[in-house]
Amino acid sequence: MTDDRLLEVRDLEVEFTTRDGVVRALNGVSYGVDAGETLAVLGESGSGKSVTAQAIMGILDMPPGRITGGEIIFQGRDLLRLSGEERRRIRGPKMAMIFQDALSSLNPVLSVGYQLGEMFRVHRGASRKEATARAVELMERVRIPAAKDRVNDYPHEFSGGMRQRIMIAMALALEPDLIIADEPTTALDVTVQAQVMDLLADLQREYRMGLILITHDLGVVADTADRIAVMYAGRIVENAPVKELYAAPAHPYTKGLLDSIPRLDQKGGQLYAIRGLPPNLLHVPGGCPFHPRCPRVRDRCRTDLPPLYAVSEQAADGAADATGERAEAVSADPAQDEIARVPELGARSSACHYWKETVDDARRT
C-alpha cells in the first residue's frame, strides 16, 4: 500500500437473501484510491457499483444484505472490523457520500440550512447560530447565489442543479479525506452536468480528497478521472488509467461501452448497442459472465471464469512475453499460470482470457 493510499477494497463479497434465492451482488471486488486521485467506477445498472459504495460507507441494508468476505482498508484500518459507533464517527469527518437523487435524499420538511448545519451540531458541537453561519459558508463555497437569503429555503424551492450542489456542500462540510459520488449528474441537463463536475474537480484539488465517481456515462469521466474500474455482474472486469483505457480497452465489455458513445463523425449511422441484457445475478452463466453477449466468445469462455490478468504493455505490443502468451492459452503449470495472472492492486488488469487480442483490435481501429 502506498503512503498516499486512502482506501483499499480487497476481494469484497456481498450477497442478498431474497424470496427467490441468494443474490451474489459482489464477487471479489478489489480497487484502491489514493489521496487526490479520482477513480471512476463504470458499468450498467445492476453491476454492483452502488452496493460497493454502500458497503464502504457502512450503510448497506443488513438484512437482507450480508458482507460474506473481503476487507475494506481505510487509512490503515479494516472498516469491517469496527463497531457501528466507530463507523458512524468516520462517516462525515473522514468519508462522505453524494447520492444520485438529491430531491429524495434531502428532507423535504427541513430547510437546507438546517440540514447542512446538522453536520456541525452533531460532529462539532456547534450552536444553532454557528451551524447556520457555517451552512451559509458552504452554500457560498459551492456557488449557490444569494446564500444568506436562501439558507432557510426548502429543497423543493431549488432547481435540480442547485439541489445537487447542496448535496456536495453537505458531503464537504467536515472536509473528509474521501468522497464517494454516486451518479451525481443523473437527471441533470448537459450544461449543468459540466458545472457540477467542474465544481467537484475544483473542490477536490483544493482539499486533495480522494474521489470515487460512480457512473454509467463514459463521457462524464473522460476529462475528470485518473483511473477507471469497469464492473460487470458484481466483478471488476477491467482496471486501467483513463487514457490507456480509452485508447485501447482490454475487455470486450469495455470496448462495447466505448463503442456505444455517439460520435460526430458517424452522423446518420446506426448507434452501436451491446446485444442482450446483463445477467440475472440469481442465475449467472458459467465461465465468463459476459460470454452470452460477447462478440469474440470461445469455448473456453463458457467454462473457465477468467481471473484478473495483469495487462502487459509489452505483450500487447506483440513482444515475446509470458503473461501475453498465457492470456491466449492456459499454462502447462497451473500454479505458475495463476501467479502470472495476479496483478498488483491498481495496476492495469483485465478479466478476459483474450485481452491481448482485444487490445490489438482496438489499436488497429
Image: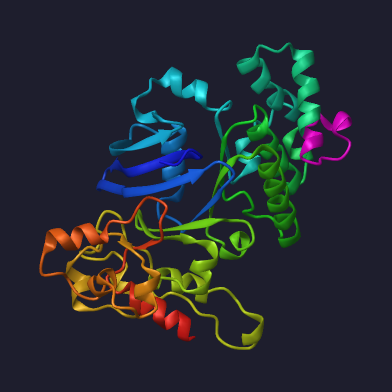
* Above-or-below relation of 328 to 191: below
* Above-or-below relation of 232 to 83: below
Is residue 152 in view? no
Q: Nearer the viewer, residue 190 or 340?
A: 340
* Residue at screen point 33% across, 32% down: 63
> Is 342 left, or right, of 269 in this rendering?
left
Q: Is 50 within the magenta?
A: no
> Is 357 left, or right, of 34 in this rendering?
left
**Place of residue 167 in the rendered image (x, y in percent of width and height, measured from the top left):** 66, 38
Determine which quarter of the picture holds residue 204: top right
* Residue at screen point 26% across, 61% down: 341
> Is 357 left, or right, of 133 in this rendering?
left
**Place of residue 240 in the rendered image (x, y in percent of width and height, measured from the top left):** 46, 61
* Residue at screen point 39% across, 42% down: 9
Q: Is 152 within the magenta?
A: yes
Q: What stretch is highlighted in magenta?
A: 139-153
Determine which quarter of the picture holds residue 1: top left
Q: Which of 93 and 273 is in front in this view?
A: 93
Q: Looking at this view, name the residue that lies furthest to the bottom.
A: 268
Is residue 168 in view? yes
Q: Which of 317 and 46 is in front in this view?
A: 317
Q: Looking at this view, name the residue that lies furthest to the front.
A: 320
